[in-house]
Every structure is written in C-alpha cells, then in structure tokens.
Image (tube, rainbow, N blue to C red):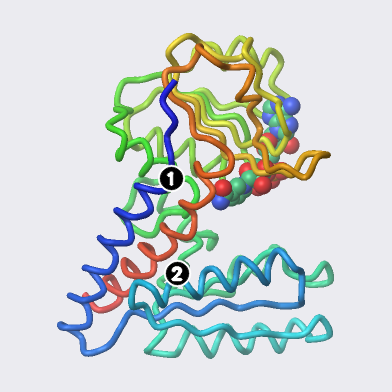
Amino acid sequence: MQQLLAKPVVEAVHLEVSDRVSRFKAKHGRAPGLAVVLVGDDPASVIYTTKKGQAAVAVGIHHETVEFSTQSSESEVIAAVRKLNLNPKIDGILVQRPIPKNFDAEASLYWVDPAKDVDCFHPINVGKLAAGLPGLRPCTPMGVMRILKHYGISVAGKTACVVGRSNIVGKPMAALLLEANATVLHCHSQTKDLMKLTRQAEILVVAAGKPGLVTADHVAKGAVVIDVGIHRNAAGKVCGDVDAAALAGIPSAITPVPGGVGPMTIAMLLANTVTAAEMRES
Ligand SMILES: NC(=O)c1ccc[n+]([C@@H]2O[C@H](COP(=O)([O-])OP(=O)(O)OC[C@H]3O[C@@H](n4cnc5c(N)ncnc54)[C@H](OP(=O)(O)O)[C@@H]3O)[C@@H](O)[C@H]2O)c1
C-alpha cells in the first residue's frame, strides 16, 4: 500500500511557485501579495494564520496579516477587507475562518473581490468552477488533485467517490474530479448505502469530518484512498476519516493523516496567490 505523502508534492509546488514569483517580480517590479484577515484569538486560527504568513515569505510572496480583536465589529472588518480589495500590492485575500458567530456568514462570502478570492469562496468563483470556466480553484480540493497528479494517478474515465458535500471540500472536490473526466459518485449523511457506493470507487475521497468513518468494508481492492479528515483522537493523536490501520492490504495507495492532504492546502494557497497576481496583471 503506497503512502501518498504530501512532503515531496509540497516541495515541488514551492519550487514552482518560487519560480513563478521570480518571473512575476522581473516582469512587474513587485512581488505577488497575500493578505490574511484574522478576527479574534482562536488558537487554531492563530497557528494557521502564522503558518500561511511564513509559507508566503518563504516563496517570496509579499505578506500582510490584518488582525482584529474579538470585540471588533463586523463593519470594521468589512472596511478593512474593502481597503485590501483596492490595494494594488495585494493580489490574494483570505479571511481566516471561523469568523465570529455574530457576523453574517453568508454575506461574508461576498466581502473579498472575486479576483483576489484565493480561498474560492465567492459565489462568482464557485459558479466559474461549476461552469468549467477558468479561474481560481479552492485550495484543499486542488491539493488533492495535485497529489494525484504528482503520484501519476490518472483520473480520466475512473469511478471516483466523494464522501462529504461541504462548500469548502466535498462539492468543489466532486467538481474538480468531474472536470478531470472522472465518473463521480457523491455521498453525504443522507446517502442510504454508503458502503455500496464507496466500494465502487477506484478513487475514494473522504471528507466527512467523522473519525474512522471509512473501514475495510468500504474500500475496493486496489482503490486509491484520499483522507481529507483531520481530528485528534482521545489519546491526542492526529487521525483522519479513514481507519487506515484496518485497510492494510486493500487499497493500492492512501494519503496518511497527518502528512497527506493537510499540508497541501497552504501550498495551493501560495499557488493561487500567484495565479491571482498573474490574472490581475494580464
Ligand atoms: N487542509 C485540510 O486538510 C482540510 C481542509 C478542510 C477540511 N479538512 C477536514 O476535512 C473534514 C471535512 O471537512 P468539511 O469542512 O468538509 O466538513 P463539514 O462541513 O462538516 O462537512 C462534512 C460532510 O460530510 C458529510 N457526512 C457527515 N457524516 C457522514 C456520514 N456518516 N456518511 C456520509 N457523509 C457524511 C456531511 O453530510 P451532510 O451535508 O448531509 O451533512 C457533510 O456534507 C474535517 O475533518 C476537516 O477537519 C481538512
């Protein structure tokens, strides 16, 4: 069972992005710029924001973090995002989620200029993906596609099954697989016989947010299993949506948790920032 590790893929993406940044700087006299907006002091969000900033700097991307305290009002945050929308040095803007519960989550999807929406949350970008139009693509599903490409796993013509239909992972994942000419089965919590569908998959992507949901009985012999889930179990160990230990000898390849899909999200955010910069200057 091959382990589809993120490390070499992330290294390849970083090299590619650094090269694109150098060429962008030579052509336009500035680095692509990424702004991260953080509201509050949620420990996980603070860690993610710091990691995003460090990764951006490491590949030569100009980076700014705009921080707001938990007491900040929604209108203050919106005003800052609007300023970033107009800032010519900034090509990508990301509002770190979760945002405070008293903010209008639906309205927040429209805050960032679609041309700078490196998370691909704006309904215009969601629509472009659904319509197969060129544009920015969401980071985590794009990271999965990049892992498949890096390890030479073909998608066209294969039966893929996606478990989960969130706007962040499941739906765009199914759209990207379809765009890559897979035949896509799409499951969710109301799916009647999950096992019957997952067992048909040659590529099984699990993003259900349920630790250990997928067991040996869900997986066909020789399938490629991509585990997007991230959890901490009772013993404090990081684990995924797939019970990987129980799958030994069944799939041909699997992404481990940790070290599989997780690190891809930030790598693809960097790639998206450069893509946004190139599109804005073209
Ligand atoms: N960088 C990364 O690696 C990364 C990024 C994002 C998320 N994640 C992880 O990926 C996982 C999923 O994230 P998310 O944001 O997509 O979660 P989410 O918003 O909670 O969505 C979970 C999806 O799974 C479906 N589901 C739940 N239980 C199910 C079951 N028993 N059978 C079939 N489908 C089921 C839900 O169906 P309904 O729609 O019917 O409720 C829902 O569509 C989480 O563990 C998260 O931490 C990782």
Q: Report the side of 231 relative to 33 (left or right).
A: right
**Quarter of the figure with residue 38:** bottom right
Q: Position of residue 23 (x, y in %)?
A: 17, 75
Q: Is residue 98 above or below residue 71?
A: above
Q: Quadrant of the C terminus?
A: bottom left
Q: Quadrant of ligand 1?
A: top right
Residue at which label 1 appears: 6
Can the viewer see residue 168 in this picture? no
Q: Quadrant of the N terminus?
A: top left
Q: Which mark is residue 109?
A: none
Q: Residues within 10 Å of mark 1 (few under 14, many from 20)?
A: many
Q: Do the residues bearing badges 1 and 2 touch, measured as CB atoms within 8 Å?
A: no
The CA distance from mark 1 to mark 2 is 15 Å
Q: Report the side of 60 relative to 197 (left or right).
A: left
Q: Position of residue 19 (x, y in %)?
A: 21, 68
Q: Position of residue 279 (x, y in %)?
A: 28, 70
265 and 275: which one is in front?
A: 265
The residue that appears at 56% across and 27% down in the rendered structure is 186
Sequence-wise first label, 1 or 2 = 1
Q: What amino acid is found at the position of numbered circle 2 in the picture? A: Ala
**Quarter of the figure with residue 281:** bottom left
Q: Secondary structure at mark 1?
A: helix
Q: What amino acid is found at the position of numbered circle 1 in the picture? A: Ala
The residue that appears at 65% across and 83% down in the rendered structure is 78
The residue that appears at 51% across and 10% down in the rendered structure is 220
Q: Secondary structure at mark 2?
A: helix
Q: Residues within 10 Å of mark 2 (few under 14, many from 20)?
A: some
Residue at which label 2 appears: 55
Q: Is residue 98 above or below residue 169?
A: below
